[in-house]
Structure formats: C-alpha cells, structure tokens
Image (cartoon, coloured by chain):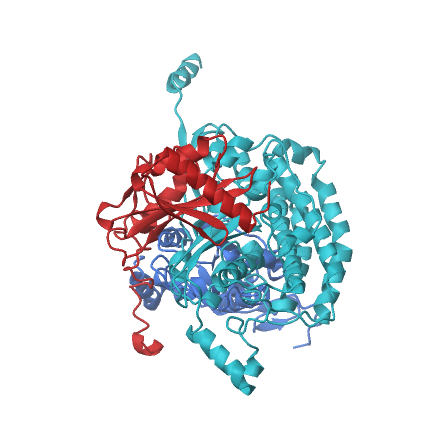
C-alpha cells in the first residue's frame, strides 16, 4: 500500500506542466467558429492564441466588383444579428458621397428600424449570456419577441434576417398600416417582457456570481484595443457614435448613454440591457414625430434611387433612370468618404474611395468585432475555462463581422 | 381477421404490415426506419447567418422538438445528421470533412442555405463553392438564409430519406464507390 | 466635445498642419479636406514619428486609432501601395486621416502596433490582403486566409472569383 502511494508521488513532476487545450473552431460552447489554443494550468487559463478567418468571405474584394446598390446585400451579412443598421450605414455612406439630404420623416423611420434591430441584437446577446450561465428559460422566452421584431421587418421589407433594407435615398416603399399596428403592439407588449427577463437575471445570485469580475478590461486598455460600443461603455467610457457624430437626425432625440464601471461580463450585460430601454424610448419619441399618413419615404434623387418597378414598365423617364442606375451610367463624385454608425457592437465604419465608376474603387469596413476580439486573450488570461466562454458570449463576437 | 380499434391520436404512422389482435408484423427495415426517423440527433455545424435562423428554428416559436430532433448532439460520434449551416470557407473545409468522418454510419447531411449548397453570393477565392465538393449531401435547403419553415421542411425531407432507406444501402458497392470518390473509405 | 462643422474641420486642419510643419518640416507632402476629414499625406519615413507625436502631444492627443487599411493604385507609378490611418481624439471629437504611399517594389511601412495595441491585427489583415510588410510587427503572419496561399488577394490584379469552378463559363454571363 505504502509502496503504491510513493509510486504515485514519483509520477507527479516537481515543476508545473501546462496542458494545451484546443477550443474550436466547432466547439459547441463557442457561438460561431473561433479557434483558441489555450495553455491551461488545470482549469486556469495561462495564455490563449486565437485563430480567426474560418468564414473569411472576402467582402472588401467583392465590394470592388459590385455597383453601389448591390453592396447592401453584403452589409447584411456582416453583423447578421442587426443587419438593418449595417444597411442604413451603407446607404448613408453613399448619400454622404453624393451629397443627398433626406427628408426628416425618412430619417426618423430609419431611426425606428435601427433601434429595433439594436434591440434584437442585444436580446440575442443577453439571452445567450443567460444560456451560458445555465438559464435556458430567458432565451426561450425572449426569442418570441425577437421573432416579433422580425415580423415587423418582414412586413416592411419582406425578409427576416438578411434584410437588404431600403435604398440609397430612402426606402423602397412606405410603411403599411399593418406594420404600424405591429410596431404599436410591440411597443405596448415588450416592456413588461423585458422587465421580466431582467428580473430573472439581474439580481440573481447565481448569475451575479458567475459574471461579476469575469473577463474584465480597464477603460485604458479598452481604448488601446480600439473597443467601441457596449463593450467600451461597460468599461466606463461614454463614447457613442449616435451622440458624438450624430447621423440620421439622432441629435433630435433625447436619450442616455449607459456606462458601466469595471468592464466585466456583468457590466456588459447591464449596459446592453439599459441600451434596450433607451432604444425603446428613442422609438417612442420617433413615433411621436412621424405623421403616419404622409407619403414621404425617399429623397428626390432619381439618379440614384431605383424607381418602382411599375413605373419602369410604364413611364419613359423611370425606365431611363432605371437603365442608368443598373448600367452604372450615373456620375458619382470622386472622393473619399468615411461614415460610421453605432452598430450593435460599436462603431461600424465604411471607408469608401470612389473613382467615379459604378463600383467603389476601394471599400474598407471598420468592423468592431474584428477589432475588439484581439483583446480576448488578455481578458481571459488568469480566469477559468468556463468563464472564458462566458466572456466570449458577453462580448457578442459575431463571426460574420469578425472575418468579413 | 377482425378490425383493430385504433387510437385517434396519430403520433406516427405505422408502416405497412400484418396486424391482428395482439400482434403486428412488418419487415425489420421498416421498423428500424420508423424508429430512426423520429429520433434524429442533429449536429449543428453553424458558421454564420444561417446559424442564427437555426437558433430561431430551435427556439420556442418554431420548436424543432416537435419532430423528435430537439436533442442536439454536439459530439459527431453520437450524431445522425450533420446540419451544415452557413458559409464554409476553404480554411474550414478540412474541419468539416473531419467532423463528417468522425460520424458513425448511418449518417445524413443537410446543407442549409445558399452558401453551404453552392457558395451562394460569395463566389470568391476564399469560399468553398458548395460543401458537396468535400462531403456527400442528402438534402439542400435553398434560401439566404432559409426561413425556419424551410428548415423544418428540410428536416422532414431528411426524415423521409431516413424512413425509406434500405438497411443494406451503406454496404452497397454504389455507396462505397461514392465514398471513395470523396476520398473516404 | 464639439459636433463637427465645416468651420471646426477647417480650423482643425489648419492647426494640425501648422503643428506638423513645425515639427516635421519635410514630412508632409500634401493636405486637404475630404468631406468631414482633414487628410494629410505624409512620407513613409516619418509615419511612426508623426503618429507618435500626434498621440503624445497634449493638445492633439489622438489616443484612438479608429481604423487603418491598405490601398492599391496600380496606375500611380512609384506609389502603387499605401496605408491609411484614421485617428480620433474622443474628448474633443477631432478626427483626422493620414495616408502614406510607397512603391510596390519597396512595399514596407513601419509598424504602429507598439503605439496602438489595436493595430496588431489590423496590420496583420493588411499584410494578408496586400502583402504590405509592417516592419517591426511582432507577429506578422496571415490572419484571415490560409497560411499556405501564395498571393495577396486584395491586390487589383488578382481576380475575385474562385478559380477552381468549372461549372460556369463566360458564355453564361455574356462575357
């Protein structure tokens, strides 16, 4: 007996040996395809080496080969949890390039759609954080309401997820009565649901123990790493593109920018939660500002705004413009323009170089996920393996935006 | 032979066979097909946008559990159905093939969305132009991304294949020749 | 924090140009205002010092690198490649853009990943896309594409489409 114990002791080495763990790219716990090679001391992470690019789809290269109005479909697939924001961001970039001013009503409609998709985005992120701490209920519960947002999108543009929303210069059609009805129902019914969802987790002992102090990042490091959006605000920096460089008439709205303190998982969760309430308030203000019966849904820019199909078949002028737009005969100014919107994950920027042709000469996407994911190894070092998963889901890393 | 009284609740159609009081006889193949069909364990290989629509399919509004597939198997060893959802890049291709090779026979593959089926709008240097270049596919679901209803329809198509598949199919020369074509033994 | 108006941008452009001209008399090639951004084209040899100066100077204090990307102009002889940097001073809400150009035969630029941690992956991405060598980068290897590809896909001469496809030919697309 004694001999055996001695034998076991002799097997355990004097110095520490770290084990290497390959997490991903198809690990069920990582939401999306990310590979991390972790150096582990038991359950503790010593260092991490991420590998990305598993769904690299060459967006920037494709964009150089597509006319302006076809790039909207690409932006859908960047952060597919909130594609309308990406669509609007792209339209605004082109509008900035060609110098179009939109009617206020169109801008407010855009604000409603962008805030709805922000809610959908944050709902996924927050409910998935819940799932990773073991609370499946919240996810199943709020997903019905995310479906409801998708129903509104479907009513407006015909698609659920990859919306291809709007046109350069406005929307393709006015909002239907049914869409307004659905939006009203959502505004009425969603707040108690969100409240209930928050009650489930916010002061939940288990949830707090799992998330407070997990995966923190300081404000200084976050800025160094180029964080933007909810993740930066959770670290305590009140940078919001909607306030700093307002677009689409965000300056007309009164809303708060929620911030956290420690930049940990709990703060990120809370900031996203508060942002949903602010989004609700923005939508409410926008609804009040809009005359529902008015029929203004695009700017008068026939050189860029695709005419309705029935006009193309019946009116000479519309046919000419349709032809000019599709064949790329309209003159686009030469120049460089950068436009940023506050996407679901932060500053989503479009850097566009136009040489006057029908497609961009160069289009660079500033993708917030790609930029802040490089801080991930630093954030999980010294933590537990299960906390690393939680950190990733609370950062809301979207593979499509990460790899472009 | 007297008429058997049936319950009105029709959970699953029984296959054709001989039945009488206290017994029901059918071929083994059909009984196995029936059992397999209603308890498919899918392995979700979700990479991008389609994965989000799959989440919606799994969640409360659409609920894939109604078709006996709510038990997701994240281990390829215990999975019957590989659901490939989203763009597969050339970098990801070998990983997908490895996952497929680890699955035990009989296995089925569902390709969801335009990217997995054909590369979709991403006809680029980095994207695999359809997963059927590296693994055999049973059912393709069109759409970019497909609606949850389409995913359910795709699963029902798979169920039909599973139900009617001959037990000897995987031993046939034709099947073996196909595997050799894909570089698998 | 000020919302950027045309006058603000003009005065920002002038003040930074004056500062840079004073500090780096031969470093600035040209400057302009493109939409809402002051743009400075600088010499490659001075990129690192200029960015360091702009970051550390108390007045300018561009502490945030918003984005950077590679550029390729095959027709510009002698300056085929370029890099664009976009800086942000959040408290003052000042944003500027710096650009530098160099020849394809001499395709390198000093790394700024030591100044801005965020540049680490951005530079790897631009290396992956354009083959621009960021001198001094600690870990300059491909990030999005596979390690074994032999080309730099974002260069203009490289085709977009997958070259392994045989199921479509040009006659289907009227080309």
Residue drawn at point x = 56 percent, y = 59 percent: A88
Question: Number of numbered discs present?
Answer: 0
Residue drawn at point x = 55 percent, y = 86 percent: A315
Residue drawn at point x = 64 percent, y = 41 percent: A271
Q: State the image quarter where residue B125 is shown.
A: bottom left
Chain in cyan colour: A
Instruction: Answer with left or right where residue A206 lies relative to residue B134.
Output: right
Image quadrant in which the N terminus of chain A is located: top left
- Measured as percent of width and height from the top left, residue B14 is found at 60, 69
Q: B28 or C111, which lies in front?
A: C111
- Classify A328 as above or below A259: below
Q: A375 or A399, which lies in front?
A: A375
Residue at the extreme top: A2
Residue C65 seen in the figure: no
Q: Colour of chain C?
A: red
- Measured as percent of width and height from the top left, residue A70 is found at 47, 67
Residue drawn at point x = 33 percent, y = 78 percent: C174
Residue A189 seen in the figure: yes
Q: Colour of chain B?
A: blue
- Measured as percent of width and height from the top left, residue A350 is found at 48, 54
- Classify A352 as above or below A301: above
- Measured as percent of width and height from the top left, residue C76 is found at 27, 56
């Amino acid at each position: 007996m004694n001999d055996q114990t001695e034998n076991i002791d002799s097997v355990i080495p004097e110095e520490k040996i770290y084990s290497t763990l390959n997490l991903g790219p198809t690990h069920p716990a990582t939401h999306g395809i990310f590979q991390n090679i972790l150096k582990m001391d038991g359950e503790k992470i010593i260092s991490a080496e991420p590998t990305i690019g598993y769904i690299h789809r060459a967006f920037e290269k494709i964009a150089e080969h597509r006319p302006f109005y076809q790039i909207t479909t690409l932006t859908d697939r960047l952060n597919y949890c909130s594609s309308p924001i990406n669509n609007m961001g792209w339209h605004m970039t082109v509008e900035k390039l060609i110098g179009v001013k939109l009617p206020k009503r169109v801008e407010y409609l855009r604000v409603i759609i962008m805030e709805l998709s922000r809610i959908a985005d944050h709902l996924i992120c927050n409910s998935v954080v819940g799932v990773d701490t073991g609370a499946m209920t919240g996810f199943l519960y709020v997903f019905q309401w995310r479906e409801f947002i998708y129903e509104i999108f479907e009513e407006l543009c015909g698609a659920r997820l990859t919306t291809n929303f709007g046109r350069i210069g406005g929307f393709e059609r006015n909002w239907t009565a049914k869409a307004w009805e659905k939006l009203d129902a959502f505004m009425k019914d969603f707040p108690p649901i969100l409240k209930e969802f928050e009650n489930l987790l916010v002061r939940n002992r288990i949830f707090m123990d799992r998330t407070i102090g997990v995966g923190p990042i300081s404000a200084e490091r976050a800025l160094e790493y180029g964080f933007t959006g909810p993740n930066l605000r959770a670290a305590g920096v009140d940078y919001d593109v909607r306030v700093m460089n307002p677009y689409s008439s965000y300056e007309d709205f009164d809303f708060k920018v929620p911030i956290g303190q420690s930049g940990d998982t709990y703060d990120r969760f809370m900031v996203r939660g508060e942002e949903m309430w602010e989004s609700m308030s923005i939508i409410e203000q926008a609804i009040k500002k809009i005359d529902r019966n008015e029929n203004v849904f695009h700017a008068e820019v026939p050189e860029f705004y695709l005419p309705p199909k029935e006009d193309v078949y019946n009116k000479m002028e519309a046919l000419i413009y349709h032809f000019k737009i599709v064949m790329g005969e309209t003159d686009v100014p030469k120049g460089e323009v950068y436009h940023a919107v506050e996407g679901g994950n932060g500053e989503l920027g479009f850097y566009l170089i136009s040489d006057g042709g029908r497609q961009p000469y160069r289009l660079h996407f500033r993708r917030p996920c790609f930029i802040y994911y490089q801080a991930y190894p630093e954030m999980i070092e010294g933590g537990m393996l299960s906390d690393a998963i939680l950190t990733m889901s609370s950062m809301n890393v979207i593979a499509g935006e990460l790899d472009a | 032979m007297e008429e058997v009284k049936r319950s009105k609740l029709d959970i699953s159609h029984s296959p054709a066979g001989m039945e009488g009081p206290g017994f029901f006889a059918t071929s083994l193949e059909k009984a196995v097909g029936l059992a397999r069909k209603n308890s498919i364990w899918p392995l979700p290989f979700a990479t991008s946008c389609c994965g989000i629509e799959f989440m919606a399919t799994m969640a409360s509004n659409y609920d894939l559990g109604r078709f006996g597939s709510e038990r997701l198997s994240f281990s390829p060893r215990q999975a019957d159905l590989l659901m490939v959802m989203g763009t597969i890049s050339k970098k990801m291709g070998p990983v997908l093939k490895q996952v497929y090779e680890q699955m035990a026979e009989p296995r089925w593959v569902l390709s969801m969305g335009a990217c997995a089926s054909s590369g979709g709008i991403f006809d680029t240097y980095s994207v695999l132009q359809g997963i059927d270049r590296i693994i055999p596919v049973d059912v393709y679901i069109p759409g970019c991304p497909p609606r949850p209803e389409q995913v359910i329809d795709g699963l029902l198509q798979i169920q039909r294949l599973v139900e009617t598949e001959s037990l000897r199919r995987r031993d046939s020369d034709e099947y073996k020749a196909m595997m050799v074509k894909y570089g698998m033994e | 924090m000020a919302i950027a108006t045309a006058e603000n941008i003009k005065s920002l452009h002038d003040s930074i140009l004056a500062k840079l001209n004073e500090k780096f008399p031969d470093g600035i090639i040209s400057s302009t205002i493109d939409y809402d951004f002051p743009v400075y084209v600088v010499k490659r040899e001075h990129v690192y010092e200029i960015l360091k100066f702009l970051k550390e100077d108390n007045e300018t204090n561009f502490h945030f690198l918003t984005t950077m990307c590679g550029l390729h102009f095959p027709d510009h002889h002698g300056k085929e490649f370029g890099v664009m940097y976009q800086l942000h001073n959040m408290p003052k809400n000042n944003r500027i853009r710096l650009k530098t150009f160099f020849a394809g035969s001499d395709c390198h630029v000093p790394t700024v990943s030591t100044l801005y941690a965020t540049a680490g992956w951005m530079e790897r991405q631009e290396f992956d896309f354009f083959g621009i060598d960021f001198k001094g980068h600690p870990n300059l290897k491909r990030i999005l594409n596979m390690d074994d590809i032999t080309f730099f896909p974002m260069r203009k001469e490289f085709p977009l489409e997958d070259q392994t496809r045989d199921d479509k030919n040009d006659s289907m697309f009227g080309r």
